[in-house]
Structures are given as C-alpha cells and as structure tokens.
Amino acid sequence: MQFIPEAFYPLFGQLSFGGLLGFFVGYASKKLLKLLIVSIGVFFAALLYLSYIGFIEIHYEKIMASTEGFLRSFMNMLGGGFSLPVFLTANIPFLGSFLAGFGLGFKVG
C-alpha cells in the first residue's frame, strides 16, 4: 500500500531543496546584515568624531545630492524588465519552501 503517489516525488525534492537553501541563505543573510550594520555604524561614528575634532569637514549637501542620484538610478533599474507576479508564480512550491526556510534561518541566525 502506497501512501504517497509517485507524481508528488518531484514536488518533495523542490520543497526540501527550497527549504534547506532558504534556511542557509536566511541564516547567512542575518549574520552578514549584522556585520554590515556594525561596520557602517563604526564608520559613521569615526567620521563624526573626526569632524568634531576639526580634522575633516563634511559637506552634507553633496552627500544628499549623491544619495538622491543613486536612489533615482536604482529605482529606474528596478522598473525595467522585472515583473514580480511572473517571478512569484514561476516555481510556487520551491519559492514557498524557500521563503519559509529563509524566515526560519533569519530568525535562528
């Protein structure tokens, strides 16, 4: 007596691979995100300290102008050729298990 039809076997492969891959990517993402946030914080604290003691001068207007230009070009890049509904519906079992694994890995990490 067979409980699971053979037609579902490829689905189980997608689910297990997606879940494991999602877990590892989520775990690594959280660790890298923590490292990145701490590094950026130390960098800005050092800049502010150097500005406070008069060693450097920070031009905030130029920082704002370059940030706005970067964000504008980034949004233009996302707008062309990428369709989120098509991407999300392409491999639903893999994507669902990947997102569940990613959430679990991000929480554990």
Image (tube, rainbow, N blue to C red):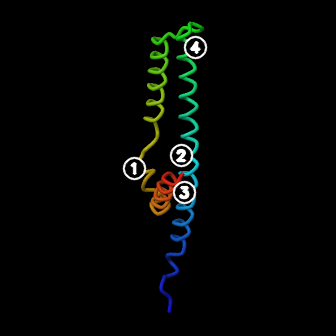
Question: Is 57 displayed left or right of 92 in the figure?
Answer: right
**Outermost residue toward the bottom in this view:** 1
In the rendered structure, the answer to whether residue 35 lies left or right of residue 73 reads right
Counting from the top left corner in percent of width and height, residue 60 is at: 47, 12
The earlier-in-sequence mark between 2 and 3 is: 3
Question: Which residue appears at 47% of the width and 26% of the height?
Answer: 73
Judging by the rendered image, the residue that carries numbered circle 2 is 30
What residue is pinned by disc 4? Answer: 50
Q: Nearer the viewer, mark 4 or mark 1?
A: 4
Label 1 element class = helix
Labels 1, 3: front one: 3
- Give the Cα separation between the discs numbered 1 and 3: 23 Å
User: Which of the two labelled residues, at mark 4 and mark 2, occupies the earlier sequence position?
Assistant: 2
Q: Where's residue 40, x and y in %?
A: 55, 29
Q: CA distance from mark 4 to mark 3?
A: 41 Å
Q: Is residue 85 above or below residue 58?
A: below
C-alpha distance separating marks 2 and 1:
26 Å
Q: Is residue 1 above or below residue 80?
A: below
Q: Nearer the viewer, mark 2 or mark 3?
A: 2
- The amino acid at mark 3 is Phe
Tell me the residue that label 3 is attached to.
23
* Badge 4 vs badge 1, beta-carbon distance below 8 Å: no
Q: Quadrant of residue 55?
A: top right
Which numbered marker is on residue 85?
1
Q: Nearer the viewer, residue 76 or 49?
A: 49
